[in-house]
Amino acid sequence: MQRSLALLEGGGLRLQLGDDRHALRPCQDAIDFCGEVPASAELDGGPIIDLNLMSRRNAWRQRLWHLHLDGERRLDNDADVLLLLCRVGRLQAHGWSLQAGQAMLLEDERGELRLHGQGACLHVAELRRRP
């Protein structure tokens, strides 16, 4: 399994992956790692909410990233599966309006997306099938 982990809410998370240490904070890019790597975590300042994307490496390529948006931006979607998660603010995309805590899932809908955000912090998950 391939994993990507992003922090959505909370004070922070210290993540130990094998010999590597990472600090996760809300509204930052995800940490990518192999699911078989030994992992442990400690909270910084109380409970958290995270987004954990997992896929089979032999079937999918994945990417989980973060975007601040205040205005318009074009996103070229070439993913087989695309998730837009509005974490903070408001987002308009693909004819839909998303508020904080709402998400949109697009499957096999490639092409350009026009995103318009108002103080938006969002996470974008992309899955592409391996040939």
Image (spheres, rainbow, N blue to C red):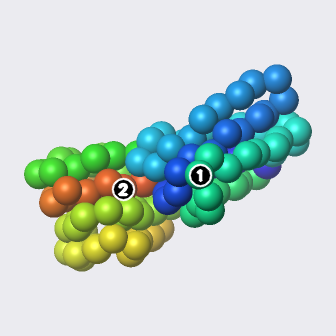
Asked if residue 115 shows in the view, the reply is no
Residue depicted at 82% across the width and 43% down the height: 40
- Give the spatial CA distance, label 1 vs label 2: 22 Å
Residue 45 badge: 1
- Amino acid, disc 1: Gly
Residue depicted at 52% across the width and 57% down the height: 10
Between 56 and 87, the one nearer to me in the picture: 87
Task: Report whether 13 appears left or right of 115.
Answer: right
Q: Quadrant of the C terminus?
A: top right
Q: Position of residue 129 (x, y in %)?
A: 61, 51
Helix, strand or loop at mark 2: strand
Residue 20 badge: none
Q: Position of residue 56 (x, y in %)?
A: 76, 52
On screen, 25 above or below 89?
above
Farthest residue to the front: give it: 45
- Amino acid, disc 2: Leu
Task: Report whether 73 appears left or right of 25.
Answer: left
Residue 122 badge: 2
Q: Position of residue 85 (x, y in %)?
A: 41, 64
Q: Quadrant of residue 13?
A: top right
